Image (cartoon, rainbow, N blue to C red):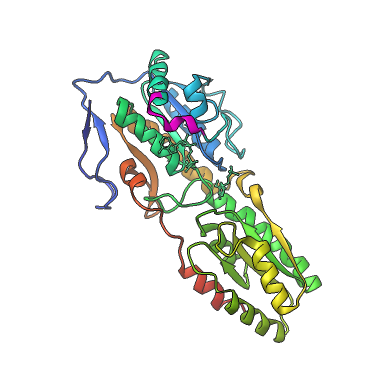
Amino acid sequence: MLRTAPSAGNGGQFWHSAVAVFTPETDSYPVKRLGILTSGGDAPGMNAALRAAVRTATTHGVTVAGYLDGYSGFVAGEFLELDDRAVGNIIQRGGTLIGTSRCPEFFDPAVRRAAVEQMRLGGVEGLIVVGGDGSFRGGLALQEECGVPVAGITGTIDNDVYGTEETIGFDTAVNTALLAIDQVRDTSQSTGMMFFVEVMGRTSGAIALHTAVAGGAAGVVVPEARAEIDGLIEQLRGSIERGKRSHIIVVAEGDEAGGAFAVGEQVGRALNHEYRVVVLGHIQRGGRPTLRDRIIASEAGAMAVEGLLAGRSGFMVGRQGGKSVEVSLAEVVNRKHPTADLNLLALAQKLSG
Ligand code: ADP
Ligand code: F6P
């Protein structure tokens, strides 16, 4: 049976108000078996989270089924038995050991109910979902419709999940993009060509804004702000006249102006200046996770298991004030995506030279 816990433990932050917990008198704790899946776009650090969750579970004598390819494996009942050895040698690897997918059937409540029946037949008593807010919506539906205890761990490079300052994968993705921008800068400086670098973020400018400031970009174009292409053209004209040779303009893929090709064409034509377009694409989703992503993923994996084993459910492990905390999943999925820090837009412009 589910009940709602009072706010607790994170300095009165408003998003920790409704974590559901199991009443010990009616529920069958201690838990013996948990399930875990990774869903949506993969993100570096998902493996570190899997490792931490599994190793925390096994120290409590709890076994773990790792469902394959997100909700697809959950629906099909396909899983990998994850023990301490199965998650060895993965903390440093990008991607996800158990695969991920987008699973349209999971929007159907009948499919979800059948999957839960199957899960219960396999002895699985709670589920950890690693993904973005879409994946959490699916997890929360399982809890609300079928009483499955669910915990969420963020795993998306877009850093666009409500209730957390950073998602697992973001730090690696911005560092990957930054390395590429630095390398493009060398050729821009040598040749005088202007570069339009497209980074990921269909609806979020977080990667673009952070890499623009850190990469010393001459301009940045993001979905959250109206693209001031005329202003960008004039700014670039001025800096070319002042003798600046290298120009990087970072464009988020989801921008209304149509991505780096469209922006490059418009700006390059107006200035009659040679330019190139570089689309970083899925390179940003892969690669070895940074130290930061490994740390926050390790904390999140451990906390998700500890929370479920303590009888709490309906929470996501997020980052607040530099700490890992439990956040109500219901709030995460019901609130709007956080807006990327637009102060960085002004800062990038101010420092563009
Ligand atoms: P992310 O988790 O990165 O936001 P998506 O929004 O694509 O990625 O969601 C991943 C998967 O989660 C979907 O393919 C689907 O299987 C499941 N999902 C998303 N939203 C819902 C929902 N409202 N109800 C049930 N399942 C959902
Ligand atoms: O992982 C997030 C993200 O990379 C978005 O920035 C991007 O728009 C999307 O996933 C692309 O995902 P896919 O190629 O898997 O559809």
In magenta, the rendered stretch is 103-110
User: How many numbered markers are drawn?
Assistant: 0
User: Toward which corner of the image does residue 277 lie, by quadrant?
Assistant: bottom right
> Where does residue 291 sit, x and y in percent of width and height?
55, 47
Q: 109 or 242, which is in the foreground?
A: 109
User: Toward which corner of the image does residue 140 lie, by quadrant?
Assistant: top left
Q: Is residue 300 visible?
A: no
> Where does residue 10 sit, x and y in percent of width and height?
28, 49
Q: Main secondary structure of the magenta part?
A: helix
Q: What is the residue that sits farthest to the right in this orientation?
A: 191
Q: Is residue 146 above or below residue 332?
A: above
> Where does residue 151 sit, x and y in percent of width and height?
37, 34
Q: Is residue 200 above or below residue 185?
A: above
Residue 182 drawn in magenta? no
Q: 351 or 156, which is in the foreground?
A: 156
340 left or right of 278 in image: left
Residue at 39% of width from left, 15% of height from top?
123
Instruction: Indicate the quadrant containing the N terminus: top left, top right, bottom left or bottom right.
Output: top left
Q: Is residue 179 above or below residue 267?
A: above
